[in-house]
Amino acid sequence: MSGHSKWANIKNKKEKTDSQRGKIFTKIGREIAIAVKEGGADPNNNSKLRDVIAKAKANNMPNDNITRSIKKASGELGSVNYEECTYEGYGPGGLAVIVEVVTDNRNRIAAEMRHIFDKSGGSLGASGCVSWMFDKKGVILIERDADMDEDEIMLAALDAGAADFVPQDDVFEVYTEPTDFSAVREKLEQAGLTFLSAQIDMIPQNSVTVSDPEAIKKVEKFLDLLDDNDDVQDVFHNGDIDE
């Protein structure tokens, strides 16, 4: 895992969260709907829902919004039937891209994804065409504070069951196997640590450097088009954008 840092991406996400908070809350609300659909509305008996609630809190989503989303998902306030879909392909510059969506219209989002890839000079592929280049991992980012003892945080993470611990200048990155993610996150939370981000990610095994200014513009425009789509939850790619 060493050498992989999501901190630049997270900083961008936080900036967007500040300006598009309502949109972020809508996306998390859809994740709550999926979690409730799969495991019920009681977070005590639904680890996936607990994980999404933790993500909501990391994004400063008010408790009232969280509760309302759970009630809506359980049918108390009327509900919409969402489903998860994953799209894979190549973006501009040959980037391998995985797009995770939550949608109430599979046909519409399929057409929109194809349009975005085609318009950007990329190509949408079949399921599995690029996912083999990525490893599925739980990723927990803890903001680094001057008062924190790195060794103590590392021991806490490893004792909680983390697979890897990578200190960066601004954050501590904690990696877990997907099956261990909930337990590790909860143990670190119980230890009093707060997270910038905590979710299951697709980590590229190797990266593709994008350094040409025109190529960088195309990649950034492509990623913005995906990010602006209301159904898109997460975008993973193997681009190392040299800015």
Image (tube, grey):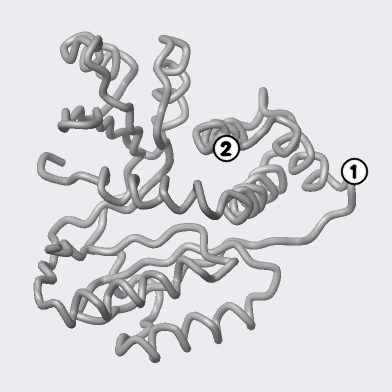
Q: Position of residue 204 (x, y in %)?
A: 22, 57
Question: What amino acid is found at the position of numbered circle 2 in the picture?
Answer: Ala
- Assign a secondary structure to mark 1: loop
Residue at 34%, 17% (x, y): give it: 160
The relative height of residue 238 versus residue 156 in the rendered view (above or below) is below
The quadrant holding residue 240 is: bottom left
Give the quadrant of the N terminus: top left
- Assign a secondary structure to mark 2: helix
Residue at 28%, 64% (x, y): give it: 237
Is residue 46 or residue 21 the one in the foreground? 21
The quadrant holding residue 119 is: bottom left
| Circle number at residue 76 | 1
Q: Position of residue 83 (x, y in %)?
A: 64, 62
Is 147 left, or right, of 168 in this rendering? right
Marks 2 and 1, the one that precedes in the sequence: 2
Question: What amino acid is found at the position of numbered circle 1 in the picture?
Answer: Glu
Residue extending furthest front?
Answer: 19
| Circle number at residue 56 | 2
The relative height of residue 191 versus residue 196 in the rendered view (above or below) is above
The relative height of residue 112 versus residue 66 in the rendered view (above or below) is below
Give the quadrant of the C terminus: bottom left
Q: Residues within 10 Å of mark 1 (few under 14, many from 20)?
A: few
Is residue 214 or residue 90 the one in the foreground? 214
Q: Position of residue 156 (x, y in %)?
A: 29, 12
